[in-house]
Structures are given as structure tokens and as C-alpha cells.
Amino acid sequence: MEVFNVVQITEADYGCEETDRSEPMALLKLVSNDEERFFEISEAELEKKGIREGKDVIFTSEGSLLKFVRVVAAVIRNEDKIFAAARGYGEYKGWWEFPGGKIEEGETPAQALVREIYEELTAEIDVKELIRTIEYDYPDFHLSMDCFWAEVRSGQLELKEAEEARWLDLNTIADVKWLPADQMLIDDIKKSME
């Protein structure tokens, strides 16, 4: 999977007075470490997917373009239980996930995770080993999620953004409706908790 940066967006028909297109199109100039590419996409699709100059994108196996979103997630463990939270906003409101968030400029994944958990849950964590990186195509973006084991170092896990939270064990881990990308991690977690 090659990640491209959108360095320029222009009208695909710039300079043409007449066109037989049914909708306005945009031309994207994309640059990766290995190549430069141009890609034409409808302006409506561009808006729907939230693709902007300066953002990263990938091509799916079918050749469509998706915004590339890189995040981190903490599987916070306390003995035989793991912490999960229900989203309190957006299209997937009420679906369950492992807490975390986006990596900011200049942060390592571990630094981002410590910051995100403190901001979202007011607790300080120790980030442990990487479980794995999940790659998942949602309808409007590609998610690349580094998933780490973590433990609470200090403070209590207090919800600031989530709708609900629970400590789950092997018997209850399947009782919640997981976000699709987070669901991909459940078998790894079960194996380590058995």
C-alpha cells in the first residue's frame, strides 16, 4: 500500500469552455516517495470523502481513492479484562471501540496514545508492545490503526467523549457491537487472554 500526499487540486476542465461532463470534476496532483501521479475525481466525491490539499490518500485495489487516516488505539488491560468505549458521536455512534486517536505532527505512536488517553479519559497509561496494525477500508476513508497493549499508570478512566464504557472479559467481549476495524483485533485479544 502506497500513501500519496495531495499537493494540488485544480478544476479538471480548467481552460475548457465547453465540456460534456455531467458533473464538475477535479484533478489531483499526488506525490509519494516513489512517484508523482494525477487523478481525476468528481468534486462531489472529493467533498464527500473529505480529501483536501496537504492530506494523505491511498488507492484501493479497485482503483478508487480514499483519504488515509492513521490512528493509534490502546487495548487497556487490567488482569483478565480489557477496557472498551462506545462512540458518543458521528455515523457510528453507539458502536464500541478501543480508545485512542490521531497521531499529530512530530509524535510517535506511543506519544500520541499517551496524549489521547489523557485527553479522552484523564488517566496516564504505560504503552506496552504493539499487538498489530489494522488496515481497513471504510466507505469514505482508509484507516491504518496501530493497536498497543496498555496499562493504567495513574488516575481513573473517566469518560469525556464516549457514550459509555465497560471492562470486558472473555465471556463479555462479544456482547458489544464493535466498529469493523476494532472487530478485527478481537481474536488477537482472545488468544492472549486465554
Image (cartoon, rainbow, N blue to C red):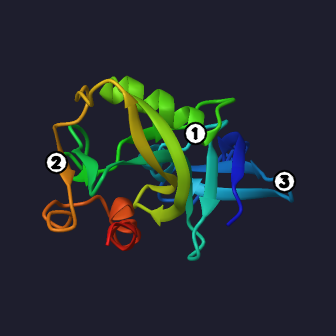
Residue receiving disc 2 = 94
Tell me which residue sits at (56%, 76%) in the image: 62
Q: Is residue 77 left or right of residue 44?
A: left
Most foreground residue, 64 or 1: 1
Which circle, 1 or 3, is nearer the viewer? 1
Other-residue count near label 3 (Cα within 10 Å), few / some / many at <14 / 14–19 / ≥20: few
**How far, Cα to Cα, is label 2 from label 1?**
26 Å
Question: How crowded is the residue under tag 2: few (<14 C-alpha within 10 Å), some, or many (20+)?
Answer: some
Percent from the top left, x then y, of residue 152? 37, 35
Q: Residue at x 27, y 47 (%)?
A: 83
Position of 8 relative to 167 (above/below)? above
Q: Earlier in the sequence, mark 2 or mark 3?
A: 3
Q: Residue at x 69, y 29 (%)?
A: 106
Most extreme residue toward the front is 79
Looking at the rendered structure, the kind of residue marked 2 is: Gly
184 and 94: which is toward the camera: 184
Marks 1 and 3 sit apart, C-alpha to C-alpha, by 25 Å
